[in-house]
Image (cartoon, rainbow, N blue to C red):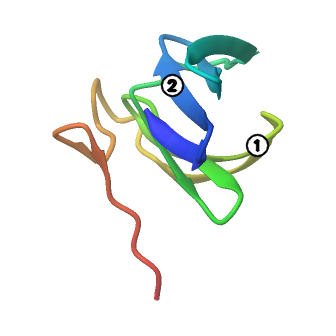
Amino acid sequence: MCVITPSEVAVSVNHGIQFITVNKTQLVQARKVQLEHDCQGIAYHQMDLFITSRKALYKYSLSGNLVCILYEDVSGPDTGKNHGGLILISYV
């Protein structure tokens, strides 16, 4: 789960992203974006979502459009860079 705004979060669920908003004291399910790959981890940074699968790190727009694949290793099962559920992003 990651915070998008003070009243909205994005949650990784199987093959998708569920957006949840806070309306007064209620949690309300908002839109859901289906992905073509599994979704193991999620992070938000500067208007983009970063999603990890078991083999890749993807960059998505908030509208759910794939921007690019930042890392991918298909040489075997669970080859992605998801270290203990954390997404590691380094900028040079």
Give 2 or 84, whichever is nearer the viewer: 2
Q: Is residue 50 in view? A: no
Q: Amino acid at mark 2?
A: Val
Q: Check disc 2: other Cα within 10 Å, few if <14, some if 14-19, many if 20+.
A: some
The residue where tag 2 is placed is 11
Q: Which mark is residue 62?
A: 1
Residue 91: x and y in percent read 46, 81
Relative to 71, say whether 3 is above or below: above
Q: Position of residue 43 (x, y in %)?
A: 48, 47
The kind of residue on which mark 1 rests is Leu
Quarter of the rendering containing residue 16: top right
Q: Pinpoint residue 3: horizontal percent, then vertical percent.
A: 52, 44
Q: Secondary structure at mark 2?
A: strand
- For label 1, count other residues whose C-alpha is less than 10 Å away and answer few (under 14), some (14-19) or many (20+): some
Q: Which mark is residue 53?
A: none
Q: Which of the image's four quarters has the N terminus?
A: top left
